Image (cartoon, rainbow, N blue to C red):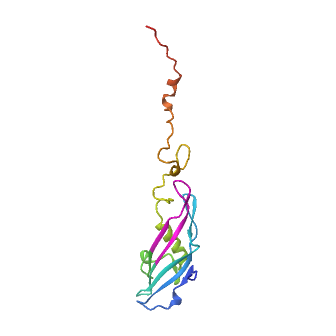
Amino acid sequence: MPAVTDILDLGGLRLSAGEGRRFELAVHIEPLSLGGEPYGALPAAVPVKLDVSRMMGNGYALRLSFEATLTGACMRCLKDATPRIEVDAREVDRPGGGEELSSPYLRDERLDLASWARDAFALALPSQVLCREDCAGLCPVCAVDLNEAGPGHTHERAPDPRWAKLSELKLERSSD
């Protein structure tokens, strides 16, 4: 297992302009909250590949790639969901290059790898976390799991409340 590294000192690498290195590390990804539900990443220490290149003018070009399993509730049926998430993120930090060339994860040549991995993981998540692609969810009337109940699960429609007063009418039959 690679060494767990949440903060990496890039200055200590002593890279010259144009030089680069690849690291195989592990990082902790803090839990996320989506729609008020907690979600986590497995394994606890996610193996990552980090490419660091020194640019001309004392800047860095960084690439982070990893795969992790998201754990939490399915957004349709509330059962456990464990989709596999692939992350490929890039950052550039060049002093004096303006806001677009300034990485929020790099300060004083120290890379906050844990924050970058968490944010990149969050951005790679699907718009809906599902236990499976074709999850049918819960019945809006009785909350039964429609994956188990099947397509034949139905309920009698409630009468339209706008017509409720008509049910109180008592009609007399004429005997002609």
Bounds of the magenta segment: 64-88
Q: Position of residue 41 (x, y in %)?
A: 55, 69
Q: Residue at x 46, y 9 (%)?
A: 175
Between 7 and 125, the one lying in front of the other is 125
Q: Main secondary structure of the magenta part?
A: strand
Q: Residue at x 47, y 13 (%)?
A: 173
User: Is 170 above or below relative to 24?
Assistant: above
- Image-quadrant location for residue 27: bottom right
Between 98 and 38, the one lying in front of the other is 38
| In magenta segment, residue 8 | no
Q: Position of residue 146 (x, y in %)?
A: 51, 49
Which quarter of the rendered picture does the N terminus lie within? bottom right
Q: Position of residue 83 (x, y in %)?
A: 50, 65
| In magenta segment, residue 65 | yes
Q: Residue furthest top?
A: 176
User: Is 3 above or below relative to 69?
Assistant: below
